[in-house]
């Protein structure tokens, strides 16, 4: 399988403390890959290096065969990298459809972003159609005119995914999407993500604390501990690795469906 994302030797220090130590990963086209680790393992720091929010002290990031290590955040997004946030970051005082429209305008670089925020931008028929297509894909079409503030947390998570999809990503980085969701909402989110990925064909890199979600959703897994990779491979096999269990202090419990889809 061709790699869409590769990191080589990503290293990052903060005030003399090594947060990442030569991290190498790859994500194949259309693949679902997980990244887990105990609190403080370096997962968020690594995500931010991939996105360009942080500049690593050493190492490179390649996307679709191109070195993007020096690209700014917005240029990485336009190259085809979408993302969601651990804490929901939605625009207040907008409807669901308007929220996606703003994402569409920003991605296309139309220069109309501030007009949209001020209620001065009139969406085109093509823009509305694109927004509604994404809402339909996520099962949110009937909520298009609803204010963001009226959504449940689970619906808000899907709107965040919708915002990322408006950028037409080839790779979607999901930062703890189950955060704040109950088990039923988490299962529903995972099911929707599978359906959308199957239709659109993008790859997913998932950072997640919910090991049950990781075990059922991902195909391969990387495990960070104190900034270094301690295990990698097929998800079920990696979760059974003694080093991984030691890193989680023996608290890692996975049900009998580990690795099932």
Image (spheres, rainbow, N blue to C red):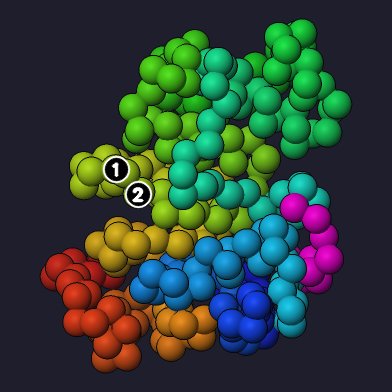
Outermost bottom residue: 242
How many numbered circles are shown?
Answer: 2
Q: Nearer the viewer, residue 110 or 125?
A: 110
Labels 2 & 1 near each other (Cβ < 8 A): yes
Name the spot of residue 219 as percent of width and height, x first. Answer: 40, 69
Residue at x-position 31% and y-position 44%:
180
The magenta region covers: 64-73
Left/right placement of residue 246 relative to residue 123 reads left
Residue 120 belongs to magenta span:
no
**Label placed on residue 178:** 2
Q: Secondary structure at mark 2?
A: loop
Residue 241 image-quadrant placement: bottom left
Residue at x-position 52% and y-position 81%:
227
Residue 14 image-quadrant placement: bottom right
Residue at x-position 66% and y-position 66%:
49
Left/right placement of residue 119 relative to residue 28 reads right
Outermost left residue: 256
> Does the magenta stretch mainly form a helix, a strand or a loop?
loop
Alpha carbons under labels 2 and 1: distance apart: 5 Å
Name the spot of residue 145 as percent of width and height, x first. Answer: 49, 11
Q: Secondary structure at mark 1?
A: loop
Q: Tell me if residue 152 comes above or below residue 198 in the rendering.
A: above
Quadrant the C terminus occupies: bottom left
Q: What residue is disc 1 on?
A: 181
Residue 89 visible in the shown view = yes
Badge 1 crowding class, 10 Å Cα cut-off, few under 14, some 14 to 19, many 20 or more, is: some
**Label placed on residue 151:** none
Residue at x-position 73% and y-position 17%:
116
Left/right placement of residue 139 relative to residue 26 reads left
Residue 71 belongs to magenta span:
yes
Residue 129 visible in the shown view = no
């Amino acid at each position: 399988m061709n790699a869409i994302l590769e990191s080589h030797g990503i290293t990052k220090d903060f005030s003399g403390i090594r947060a990442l130590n030569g991290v190498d990963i790859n994500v194949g086209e259309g693949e679902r890959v997980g990244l887990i680790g105990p609190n403080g393992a370096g997962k968020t720091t690594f995500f931010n290096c991939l996105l360009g929010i942080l500049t690593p002290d050493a190492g490179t990031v390649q996307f679709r065969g191109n070195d993007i290590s020096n690209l700014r955040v917005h240029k990485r997004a336009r190259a085809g990298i979408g993302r969601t946030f651990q804490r929901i970051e939605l625009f207040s005082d907008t409807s669901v459809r308007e929220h996606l429209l703003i994402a569409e305008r920003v991605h296309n670089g139309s220069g109309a972003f501030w007009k949209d925020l001020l209620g001065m931008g009139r969406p085109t028929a093509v823009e509305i159609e694109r927004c509604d297509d994404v809402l339909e894909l996520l099962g949110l079409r009937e909520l298009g005119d609803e204010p963001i503030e009226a959504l449940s947390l689970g619906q808000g998570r899907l709107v965040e995914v919708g915002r990322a999809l408006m950028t037409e990503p080839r790779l979607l980085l999901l930062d703890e999407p189950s955060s704040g969701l109950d088990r039923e909402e988490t299962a529903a989110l995972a099911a929707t993500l599978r359906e959308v990925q199957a239709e659109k064909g993008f790859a997913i890199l998932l950072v997640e604390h919910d090991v049950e979600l990781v075990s059922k959703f991902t195909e391969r897994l990387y495990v960070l501990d104190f900034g270094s990779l301690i295990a990698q491979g097929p998800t079920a096999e990696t979760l059974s690795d003694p080093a991984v269990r030691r890193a989680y202090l023996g608290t890692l419990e996975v049900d009998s469906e580990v690795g099932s889809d």
